[in-house]
Image (tube, helix red, strand yellow):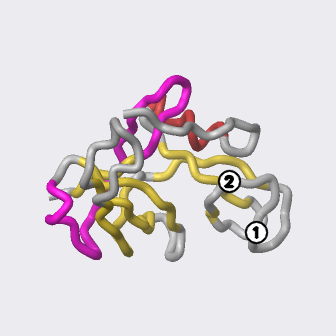
């Protein structure tokens, strides 16, 4: 499947390339001790510039999801799941990703998930699998 890949910059590069070491890197503020996503040069909570990527467990749960049946491109396999994942490290620390490795119809709110990376060129896309 072809994907539109993100333009890498100094802020987002650790997030998109941490998967090379099988590590999910999320920005963390040294001043207010909060994680945040998407990555940025300034903390959205306290406006501190003391931010850097930090490894997280890659474990979380599904907060919301949708199953897409629309083939937006000729090589896009449908159906697929788009989900909001809340990571275990912090309440409210969420990111949008895909749920893979299971039937889309078996996905449910609050299911436990773990990160899994798929490489496209120099980008490692974090996707999540349901933990049984």
For the residue carrying disc 1, how many other residues have a C-alpha within 10 Å: few (<14), some (14-19), or many (20+)?
A: some
- Determine which residue is flagged by label 2: 39
Q: Earlier in the sequence, mark 1 or mark 2?
A: 2
What is the total number of numbered labels drawn onto the structure image? 2
As displayed, is residue 113 above or below residue 44? above
Q: Nearer the viewer, residue 104 or 85?
A: 104
Q: Quadrant of the C terminus?
A: bottom left
Q: Which residues are magenta?
A: 103-126
As displayed, is residue 126 above or below residue 1? below
Percent of width and height locating residue 124: 48, 34
Percent of width and height locating residue 131: 21, 57
The answer to whether any part of residue 88 appears in the image is no
The reply to whether discs 1 and 2 touch (Cβ–Cβ < 8 Å) is: no
| Res 10 label | none
Percent of width and height locating residue 74: 35, 38
Tell me the SS state at disc 2: loop
Any magenta on residue 119?
yes
Residue at position x 51%, y 70% from top? 90
Residue at position x 37%, y 54% from top? 98
Residue 8 occupies quadrant: top right
Q: Nearer the viewer, residue 77 or 8?
A: 77
**In the image, 126: left or right of 74?**
right
- Determine which residue is flagged by label 1: 44
The answer to whether any part of residue 16 appears in the image is yes
For the residue carrying disc 2, how many other residues have a C-alpha within 10 Å: few (<14), some (14-19), or many (20+)?
A: many
Residue at position x 36%, y 34% from top? 1
**In the image, 101: left or right of 55?**
left
């Amino acid at each position: 499947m072809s994907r539109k890949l993100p333009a890498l910059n100094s802020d987002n590069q650790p997030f998109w390339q941490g998967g090379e070491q099988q590590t999910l890197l999320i920005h963390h503020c040294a001043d207010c001790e909060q994680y945040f996503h998407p990555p940025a040069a300034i903390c959205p909570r306290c406006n501190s510039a003391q931010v850097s990527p930090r490894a997280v467990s890659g474990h979380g749960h599904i907060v919301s999801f949708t199953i897409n049946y629309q083939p937006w491109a000729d090589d896009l396999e449908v159906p697929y799941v788009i989900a909001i994942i809340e990571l275990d490290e912090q309440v409210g620390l969420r990111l949008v990703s895909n749920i893979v490795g299971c039937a889309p119809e078996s996905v449910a709110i609050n299911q436990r998930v773990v990160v899994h990376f798929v490489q496209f060129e120099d980008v490692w896309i974090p996707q999540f699998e349901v933990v049984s």
